[in-house]
Image: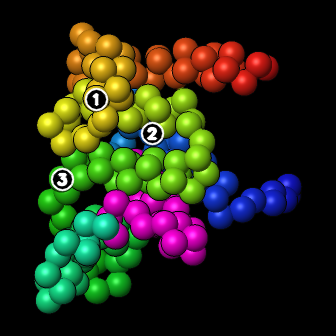
């Protein structure tokens, strides 16, 4: 059996890459959510150790203290349902798959805040998120102009188109670094 030495950050990045690849290929929603949630949880913990708050943490600070547990439980409901079967083994979950989009967004942002890296696959995900939710994603005027140009005519329902952008972003990154 081969042994692999892996850091928490590397494990989280691998999970996030697989979750986004599966997402763009319209893979299994439960598997995507499970990988995205695991990655987000690790990235959030690594960020907290460096004083970096995740989107989820920042949002929780806007919730009245007496309601924070209720909101946190609801936000973690699918993740915990997919991971544990102790108390509710016969329960059926009504899973809103749209929540995964925001778990992925939080993980992508958290990775960037931690590393400063612009991973081409993660950039493609950010573009997809903006294309689907231009009314939610806040961008500077310069970023908005770039995102509008890059997503013009792209239908966010066709996720594979965004995955096809990744090689272009990789080439651009290589050209910028001189490799």
- The spot of residue 74 in percent (x, y) is 20, 71
Quadrant in which the C terminus appears: top right
* Chain part drawn in magenta: 31-57
Q: Which numbered disc, 1 or 2, marks the residue that appears first in the sequence?
A: 2
What residue is disc 1 on?
A: 141
At 46% from the left and 32% from the top, the residue drawn is 123
Query: Between tags 1 and 2, which lies in front?
Result: 1
What residue is disc 2 on?
A: 20
Q: Which numbered disc, 3 or 2, marks the residue that appears first in the sequence?
A: 2
Residue lying at the far front of the rendered structure: 141
What residue is disc 3 on?
A: 96
Q: Which mark is residue 165?
A: none
Is 16 left or right of 177, judged from the image as shown? left
Q: Nearer the viewer, residue 27 or 140?
A: 140
The vertical placement of 77 against 113, above or below, is below
Packing grade of label 2 (10 A; few <14, some 14-19, many >=20) is many
Packing grade of label 3 (10 A; few <14, some 14-19, many >=20) is few
Q: Nearer the viewer, residue 52 or 131?
A: 52
The vertical placement of 114 against 56, above or below, is above
- The spot of residue 96 in percent (x, y) is 18, 53
CA distance for labels 1 and 2: 27 Å
Q: Secondary structure at mark 1?
A: helix
Badges 3 and 1: C-beta atoms under 8 Å apart? no
């Amino acid at each position: 059996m081969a042994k692999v030495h892996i850091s928490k950050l590397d494990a989280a990045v691998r999970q996030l890459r697989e979750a986004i690849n599966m997402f763009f290929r319209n893979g299994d929603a439960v598997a995507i959510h499970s990988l995205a949630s695991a990655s987000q949880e690790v990235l959030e913990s690594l960020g907290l150790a460096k004083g970096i708050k995740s989107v989820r943490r920042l949002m929780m600070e806007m919730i009245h203290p007496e309601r924070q547990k209720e909101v946190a439980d609801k936000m973690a409901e699918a993740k915990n349902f997919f991971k544990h079967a102790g108390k509710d083994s016969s329960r059926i979950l009504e899973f809103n798959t749209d929540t995964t989009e925001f778990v992925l967004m939080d993980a992508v942002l958290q990775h960037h805040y931690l590393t400063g890296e612009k991973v081409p696959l993660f950039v493609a995900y950010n573009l997809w998120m903006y294309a689907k939710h231009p009314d939610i994603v806040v961008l500077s005027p310069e970023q908005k102009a770039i995102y509008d140009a890059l997503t013009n005519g792209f239908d966010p329902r066709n996720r594979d188109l965004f995955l096809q952008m990744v090689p272009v972003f990789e080439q651009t990154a290589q050209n910028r670094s001189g490799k």
